[in-house]
Image: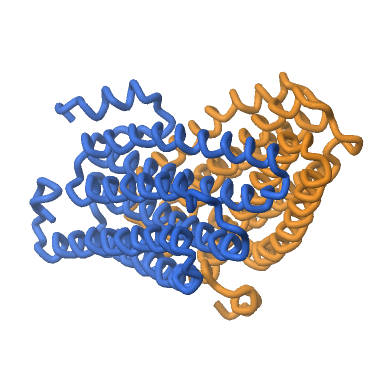
Chain colours: A blue, B orange
């Protein structure tokens, strides 16, 4: 961890505690990523058992959050970290909250997949949802990757991915509205598709949040609610 | 603050810092509550200027979050709080995150109100949304009230309000689907109403989160992801 963070603590024990915390976040992130994949597979393959499994697995995601939260609190109380280390711990507390909410969105996708399994399937087998979902899963993967390396430039690139996701989401919304109007018998199915797309789009927002905490951590600047232009400037500024 | 928290710190300065932090959260909460009221008024009165004002005001909500976050970090670094005080500070950090997201949902309501202002209005002038919105605003008000008094029993009562909100939300969804199917010309309007209802329902979830942090703070038990029955038991248990 000292290497990753580019600094060394007097106490090796503290270093290894921070490292363990960091790894636990990445493990939780891996689980959440798997939940997204499985939720998408459940929908695309019309596999209700897999969708049900995603819903059941959400309790595991939640337990990760509660456990890591506790570890973070213990570190702050026992180690009385400096501002820099504290920033890392607080970034972790926020990151796992977003990961937990991503897990919730994955279960929304799974629930909608179960609802859709009872309806006639469209000819394209929800290709547009598969596409959006894969893009979102990849965005989260990149965010976790940036977090693993504490890489602010990589985090900025992830934030920029979100615009593409919003664009695809808008396209799906327009397409579904048109379909509903042309054939009102598809209304229920279209609504489920819209809620699914919305859940995926929200995952993109949470991945963006994670990257913003990371940029704050590395650059010491709070970049939430910052325009894309200012953000790019901050992340490219290597002087810290 | 020492009175509110039921304990006294050696440093009076620390007490007043905690108190100031607590008041800032309540001030932010008051602003967010106003944003919900205004967003609803904008929709019900078809007042586009007010809806636009809600969207513009969101930047103020965001600035509150960033500023309180910074105060919390300073308190931890400078005061090295004990586990109990740290729990309060961490609860504040989480609470303001939920308040900020409630602010986002208020702007969603405002955006949909602007979109709806260009469409024919229904006979009941969105009465069901007004009703749901008022209930949600009240739930947030009760949550902030419980937070002001650090009252876990009051917080539990708020958590229980959420079931009523979910029930009303489901009713609106069913009603809108029926309307769309009966008259496909209403599809765009119904979709906007559904997104509005969804934003309000999410506000209820965030108010619930705030109460759960509070119960954790007072009772020392993490009650997120806990069944309603267990929750009631924890909040009623006065022994701590």
Vertical placement of A176 versus A133: above or below?
above
Residue B17 appears in the picture as rendered: no
Task: Describe residue A95's horizontal placement relative to residue A52 as left or right.
Answer: left
Q: Is residue A48 visible?
A: yes
Position of residue A116 measured from the top left corner of the image (x, y, whole percent): 58, 60
The residue lying furthest to the right in this view is B123
Q: Nearer the viewer, residue A65 or B19?
A: A65
- Where residue A235 sits: x, y (%)? 24, 30
Image quadrant in which the C terminus of chain B is located: bottom right
Is B47 above or below relative to A159?
Answer: above
Task: Pick whichever, A107 or A97, lies toward us.
Answer: A107
Residue at the spot x=54%, y=56% of the render?
Answer: B2
**Vertical side of B57 occupied by B234: above or below:** below
Name above or below for residue A91 compared with residue B191. Answer: below
Residue A28 point in image, percent of width and height: 32, 63
Image-based side of B234 in relation to A239, left or right: right
Question: What residue do we see at 59% from left, 43% from top?
Answer: B102
Toward the viewer: A134 or B76?
A134
The part of the image, by quadrant, that contains residue B130 is top right
Viewer-proximal residue, A220 or A110?
A110
Q: How many marks?
A: 0
Q: Write the residue at 71% across / 63% down.
A: B163
Answer left or right for B4 relative to A6.
Answer: right
Q: Indicate left or right for B190 with B68 as reference.
A: right
Q: Given the current orientation, which residue lies at the most extreme top position?
A: B49
x and y percentages locating residue A45 in the rendered image: 44, 63
């Amino acid at each position: 961890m000292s290497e990753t963070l580019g600094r060394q603590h007097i106490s090796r024990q503290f270093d290894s505690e921070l490292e363990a915390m960091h790894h636990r976040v990445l493990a939780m992130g891996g689980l959440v990523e798997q939940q997204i994949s499985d939720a998408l597979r459940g929908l695309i393959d019309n596999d209700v058992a897999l969708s049900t499994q995603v819903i059941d697995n959400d309790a595991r995601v939640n337990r990760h959050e509660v456990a890591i939260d506790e570890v973070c609190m213990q570190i702050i109380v026992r180690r009385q970290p400096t501002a820099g280390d504290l920033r890392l711990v607080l970034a972790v507390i926020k990151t796992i909250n977003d990961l937990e909410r991503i897990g919730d969105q994955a279960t929304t996708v799974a629930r909608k997949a179960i609802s859709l399994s009872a309806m006639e399937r469209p000819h394209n087998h929800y290709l547009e949802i598969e596409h959006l979902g894969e893009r979102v899963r990849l965005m989260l993967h990149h965010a976790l990757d940036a977090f693993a390396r504490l890489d602010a430039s990589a985090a900025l690139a992830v934030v920029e991915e979100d615009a593409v996701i919003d664009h695809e989401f808008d396209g799906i919304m327009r397409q579904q509205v048109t379909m509903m109007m042309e054939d009102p018998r598809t209304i229920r199915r279209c609504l489920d598709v819209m809620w699914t797309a919305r859940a995926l789009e929200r995952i993109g927002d949470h991945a963006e949040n994670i990257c913003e905490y990371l940029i704050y951590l590395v650059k010491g600047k709070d970049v939430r609610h910052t325009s894309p232009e200012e953000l790019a400037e901050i992340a490219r500024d290597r002087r810290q």
